[in-house]
Image: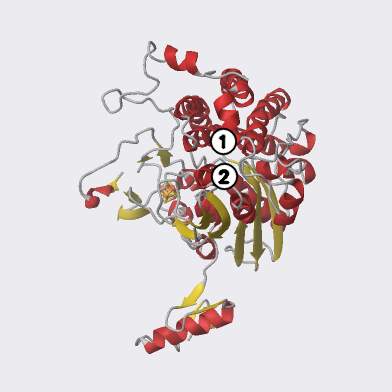
Amino acid sequence: MKTGKMLPLALKGLFTKPATISYPYQKVVVPSDFRGKLVFDPSKCVGCMLCVRDCPSGAIEIIKVGEKKYKAVVHLDKCIYCGQCCDSCVRQALRTSPEFELAVYDRKDLTVDI
Amino acid sequence: MGKVVIPIGPQHPALKEPENFVITLDGEKVVAAAVNLGYNHRGIEKACEQRTYLQDIYLIERICGICSHAHSTAFIQAAEEIAEVEIPRRAAFIRTLIGELERIHSHFLWLGVAGHEVGFDTLFMYSWRDRELVLDLVAKLTGNRVNYGINTLGGVRRDISPEEAAEIRKVIGALEERTKYYLGIASEETTLISRFLNVGRLSKEDALRLGATGPVARAADIKRDVRKDDPYAAYGEIPFDVITDTHADVLGRTLVRVKELMECYKIIRYILDNMPEGLISVRFPRRVPEGEAFSRYEAPRGEDVHYVKSNGMDKPERVKVRAPTMANAASVAHMLSGGYLADVPIVIAAIDPCFSCTDRTIRVRDIFRGSDSVLDWPALRDYSIRWYRENGLDFSGIKLFGREIG
Ligand code: SF4
Ligand code: SF4
């Protein structure tokens, strides 16, 4: 039995740099395949709606904007960033990106065309 | 002096989640304790019935932020059993790998919380610093720090590349060093031992009688672990030891968890050395054939149980979740009695509670007549229809899924 076993480590901590990152002044690097905001490639989409059907939170809409032309609207406040829509899409029209800083002042701004 | 009854919670600085403990005190001593669950009912089971199996995975995963993989795996195992789908071996290995990484981060988290509850914040700071290593690693492997979303029906969603495997080995090596250090702290540091020894005692007999599970049971010398007793995923072929301890108190629970970390590293190394080649998922039918299944998973907090019933549609007819904290709740009341008021926070924390995962029940209390009653499903339905009708909403004639609801 010993008292103060963690003391040397705690004292050493006085002279080492902090373990935390001073975010947001210092940017956090997330892995490249991090599940952040969705990215949509309209040229690949065929409007099959598989992504809409499988989304667990009803966060994605595919809207027809012309002959064989579609746009994707995502409700970032509903999206749980699971990436299931990307898995369900057989055309690889959707993918996740490492973008995670999505806070806005107005909730309306969370519905975005991607 | 007379006895004093004090409520702890649902909102209390010592609790991380809302739950209510009614403590009867004689001076500083707790003479009786009661646990009241039900402040976090979120209706997840009911919500599962309205979503497809695939969508349910993500909902189920959010039952708990700490053992999300435990819940999603338990649910998926049940669905796979009903659909008679066998997952590829590689998928089973990856599931096991993520499950063990989850156990590592959960036990590190617990160690910090336990330190914090007894005023040993140095331990809290350092163990949470080290926990970041494993969180960053799972973010790299799965795409997120919590709610990994690696599971899918019929397998897993992401493969482990050789570079990732090398990274895992590196992180595991660093964590192993840290764990040895914490094992030294837990077994030698006088202040910690004096604070944990003989606190929150739960004898082997009581643990069995009250149905304790996980590290709480293992610290009372009960060799019980679903990974060994009813192996799932790849556990059947992985050698590891079930850690038990004879202290039967908070110290025992600490030692069990820290030693379990060492087993996690052993399991992960075995997985990396023996990872089979092949597919990571197989096709899973949209409509799951009629049937029911019961699935068990050894979550970091103990045995997690899921029950799924299918009626042949693409949505489950019933999903039932029994989180490990539920099994340990009865033991908490027992462990609190006889101890001191100052020990209440650490005794509760020592089961590693996760109350929002636990709460499933609704107790219907008639505030006008002051009666407590348990309503079964048809009675609850009739009650709600009557209530709405009295309040001007008539559902008669409305059909839901082809059935009259009014
Ligand atoms: S990431 Fe998930 S929640 Fe978000 S739109 Fe895609 S499927 Fe829906
Ligand atoms: S699943 Fe892919 S192709 Fe189909 S609508 Fe969605 S984005 Fe377009």
Instruction: Tell me where residue B104 appears, x and y as whole percent.
Output: 59, 32
Please identify the quadrant where the N terminus of chain A is shown.
Answer: top right
Tell how many labels.
2
| Residue, disc 2 | B347
The answer to whether the beta carbon of the residue marked 1 is less than 8 Å from any atom of ligand 1 is no
Residue A24, placed above or below residue B307: above
Does residue B305 appear left or right of residue B23 in this picture? Answer: right
The x, y position of residue B353, in whole percent, is: 55, 47
* Mark 1 chain: B
In the image, farthest residue toward the front: B1
Which residue is label 1 attached to?
A: B158
Of tags 2 and 1, which is closer to the observer? 2
- The image's colour scheme reads secondary structure
Nearer to me, B302 or B216: B216
| Lower position in the chain sequence, tag 2 or tag 1 | 1
> How far apart in space, not on screen, are marks 2 and 1 (Cα)?
39 Å
* Amino acid found under the numbered disc labelled 2: Val
Residue A51, horizontal then vertical, whole percent: 45, 51
Q: Secondary structure at mark 1?
A: loop
Instruction: Give x and y (percent) for residue B82.
Output: 71, 58
CB-based contact (under 8 Å), mark 2 and mark 1: no
Query: Is residue A35 depicted above or below A10 in this figure?
Result: below
On the question of residue B46 being in view, the answer is: yes
* Parent chain of label 2: B
